[in-house]
Image (tube, grey):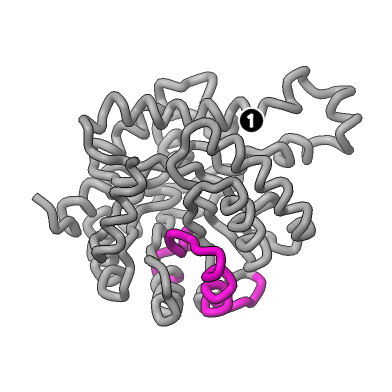
Amino acid sequence: MSYDVIRQKLQRGRVVLLDGAIGTEILRRDLTWADHQLKRRPDVVRAIHADYIAAGADVISTNTFQLTRRAFLNHFKDLDHLRHIGAPDLETRWAELLRAGVELAREARAQTAGGRPVAIAGAMTTLEWCFRPDLAPSPDQARAEYRETVEVFAAAGCDLMLVETVNSIGEAVAAAEACRAVGIPFWVSFVCDQQGKLFTGETLEQAARALDPLEPGAVLLNCAPPPDVTVGLAELARHRTRPVGVYPHVGRFNPPEWLFTDEYPPDRYLELARQWVALGATIIGGCCGTTPDYIAVLKRGLSDEP
């Protein structure tokens, strides 16, 4: 399987390249990301996956950030209200879109990878807004909802789960337990603040220790500016028992979408990536604002393979 090759690279201490942003790349291509474009413009989503594969990504992530049953239900008073005024397919649309997201990634791999092992990661984030840990549901509720979501990803053919932009240890553990229950490999990626701590005030040492018994394939940091993840990585690397990595964002959040800036062009990003590798990172990619050009530069600048 594709993920077996990735796992072996990590065991040998080789750098694994994750892809870059998808939502902001859709926006950059003059479309809104608001509905993920999985059904309206599947050609665009498939092309973005293909561009990341061509750039050298070893792992591509599905365009499914924040796609859950809860995400649709939160627009309504309750389930009865959804059924009363909502579109007829809203109760099941989340699962249909997850399957579509996985299928587009699989199609891009089949068309572009040329036999090179590329793993597909099912992208899943916190159940509520990823920067607001105070909104999180109870651990039991989170565990049940995560398992429902992971089961769809696994059945659709993902190689692993990428549980990303996690803001608390509690949700990280709940999501990890769901992945283990389903039996799919998983990586957990936290978002940290300027001090390298989670938004709850919990430390990355505490996070690493809490996750270790659940055997994640890797622990990462994402969706924060490069200086923040650098601080966090230095802390995480001191306490790692698993592969670690980073995929920060570049640019600025400009609700509801993204503001592109030139603070971190690809060449500067590569310089930072070399620092992250020196700190112990073996998984490098990009979050919001990064593009296939970033991954291509990382491939040329970090790869120890011909």
Q: How many marks?
A: 1
Residue 126 locus on image (x, y percent): 64, 53
Locate residue 5 relative to residue 156 in the image: left or right: left
Viewer-proximal residue among 141 and 273: 141
Q: Which residues are magenta?
A: 200-228
Residue 135 makes an appearance in the image = no
Looking at the figure, which quarter contains the N terminus?
A: top left
Quarter of the image where one finds residue 280: bottom left
- Residue 57 in the magenta stretch? The answer is no
- The amino acid beneath tag 1 is Ala
Which residue position holds label 1? 95
Residue 183 makes an appearance in the image = yes
Q: Residue at x 43, y 54 (%)?
A: 251
Residue 35 locus on image (x, y percent): 59, 30
Viewer-proximal residue among 33 and 298: 298
Q: Residue at x 42, y 59 (%)?
A: 248
- Residue 207 in the magenta stretch? The answer is yes
Quarter of the image where one finds residue 26: top left
Quarter of the image where one finds residue 59: top left
Circle 1 residues within 10 Å: few <14, some 14–19, many ≥20: many
Furthest residue to the left?
306
- Secondary structure of the residue carrying tag 1 is helix
Q: Residue at x 23, y 54 (%)?
A: 298
Residue 189 locus on image (x, y percent): 50, 60
